[in-house]
Structure formats: structure tokens, C-alpha cells
Image (tube, grey):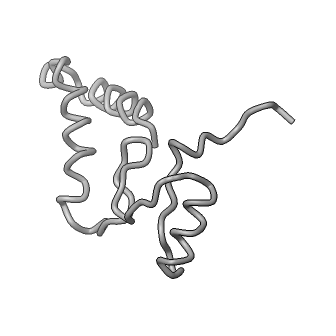
Amino acid sequence: MSGLKVNFNKSMLVRVNISDSWLNEVASALSCKVGKIHFLYLGLPIGGDLRRLSFWEPVLTRIKKRLSGWKSRFLSFGGRLVLLKSVLTSLPV
């Protein structure tokens, strides 16, 4: 109705409790890629162990990179809180 279409060349199918042969058939019919369970979606890792620190390292480095321009050590506690909230809301979550 809106005229928007799915770009299957950019799309990816991920296998969850289905056979490889069926996944490959569907992927070839839709002309899209077959992906693995560990991938990034909107900049966040999907399909890993959430309890491991290595899972969150890319997210933490992005936060540190955005905060590095600010001199957060000179801000008050409230200023740090506002700055942290603005960084977290700007990340695609």
C-alpha cells in the first residue's frame, strides 16, 4: 500500500531450527543471502552469549568513542548522567 518494497539483495536469512537444504531453497527463491547466527543488527551483536564481556566490547567501545570528545571528568554527576543518557539514546537500540 505504501509502495515500499523489500530489497532481497540486502536481506539475509538465518537458520533457526530448520534444515540447511530448505534454507538454501528459500534463499535462492527469494534471491537473498544465507547468514550465520552471529551478526550485527543496527550496530548491536545478535546471537552471542550476553553474559560474556567480549559480547559487549563493541558496544562499550562505541560509547567510549562518543564520550571521548567530552571532558566527562570535569562534569558534575548530573551532567555525566545526562551525557550518558544522550549517548545511549543516540545508539540504534
Q: Does residue 40 appear to the left or right of 58 in the view shown?
A: right
Q: Nearer the viewer, residue 5 or 44?
A: 5
Q: Does residue 13 appear to the left or right of 5 in the view shown?
A: left
Q: Does residue 21 appear to the left or right of 53 in the view shown?
A: right
Percent position of residue 49, x then y? 29, 69
Judge whether 56 appears above or below 37 on screen.
above
| Quarter of the image with the N terminus in it | top right
Q: At x 48% / y 64%, what residue is drawn?
A: 14
Q: Nearer the viewer, residue 43 or 31?
A: 31
Figure label count: 0
Percent position of residue 47, x then y? 37, 65
Q: Does residue 88 appear to the left or right of 69 in the view shown?
A: right
Q: Nearer the viewer, residue 12 or 50?
A: 12
Name the residue at the right extreme. 1
Q: Nearer the viewer, residue 83 or 9?
A: 9
To which quarter of the image does residue 38 belong?
bottom left
Q: At x 23% / y 24%, what residue is drawn?
A: 76
Percent position of residue 87, x then y? 35, 30
Percent position of residue 51, x then y? 26, 68
Q: At x 58% / y 46%, what residue is drawn?
A: 8
Judge whether 12 appears above or below 42 on screen.
below
Q: At x 23% / y 46%, what residue is drawn?
A: 58
To which quarter of the image does residue 86 belong?
top left
